Image (spheres, rainbow, N blue to C red):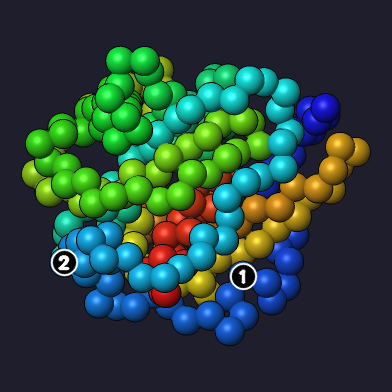
Amino acid sequence: MSRLLPAFDPRQVPVLPGVASTGLMPARADRLTADGLRQVFAHPPVWTPEVLREQRFMDRSPAEAAVLVPLVQRDRLHLLLTLRTQHLSTHSGQIAFPGGKVDAEDADATAAALREAREEIGLPADHVEVLGTLPLYVTGSAFHITPVVALVRPGFALQPNPAEVDDVFEVPLDFLMDPVNHHRHAFDWEGGRREWYSMPYQEPSVGGERERFIWGATAGMLRNLYRLLSA
């Protein structure tokens, strides 16, 4: 039986030196475009996902879930992410993809991801072009997540659900697909050891920059996307 993970600030956990980017190059530039991504998912290269399962830190029944990995087609591709509200029962206050549990009424994980994106942030399905899925990702909180990668046509108007989402923002895909921006952390506690990636992004804002600390499951799934696009 796993023991409850104690509260901690992931920003304060030291970075493991030389682990995340040693010997790695940025993802191929020709794959960081809409057409490049279409080609990759239509004809995937031989590749190996890096992060598939976290150490269990919550005792609960497994739950099937799906998230949308929405890539907005601007001058360069941008990933659309959410900041979860502080009062949610799991992963509160964290940066995440729009998504949630797969309902019995959902035809499949893709349908669930599209529904959740509409319910959470008001993203209309007619702006979304689904490309495919990444391998199943199992979180330490027992969510079995299917990441659904999609292109998003600009011109949408978002309506975030304030009960679930505090903020919505975008990060350039080429920043996230460069391993120099990936960090690996480890946290030891009585019940074991938890390791994760982070990808802190300094978002330009009025009067300076705002840090968007992307970590945990979101960063793990992005690391798998990097492995695909750099294969």
Q: Give the camera-side residue of 64 and 196.
A: 64
Relative image position of residue 185 (x, y in whole percent): 70, 58
Relative image position of residue 210 (x, y in whole percent): 45, 52
Mark 2 lies on a secondary structure that is helix
Q: Is residue 82 visible?
A: no
Q: Give the camera-side residue of 151 and 12.
A: 151
Q: In the rendered image of this protein, does residue 129 appear above or below residue 159?
A: below
Q: Quadrant of the C terminus?
A: bottom left
Quadrant for residue 125, please give it. top left
Q: CA distance from mark 1 to mark 2?
A: 28 Å
Relative image position of residue 143 (x, y in whole percent): 55, 31
- Disc 1 vs disc 2: which is toward the camera? 2
Residue at screen point 72% across, 42% down? 55
Residue where numbered disc 2 is placed: 35
Relative image position of residue 107 (x, y in whole percent): 28, 25
Position of 192 compared to 163: left or right? right
Quadrant for residue 47, please give it. bottom left
Residue where numbered disc 1 is placed: 20
Which residue of the protein is positioned furthest toward the bottom in this rendering?
23
Callout 2: 10 Å neighbours few (<14), some, many (20+)? few
Mark 1 lies on a secondary structure that is loop
Quadrant for residue 123, please give it. top left
Position of 200 compared to 116: left or right? right
- Inspect the image, locate mark 2, and give the three-letter code of the amino acid beneath it: Asp
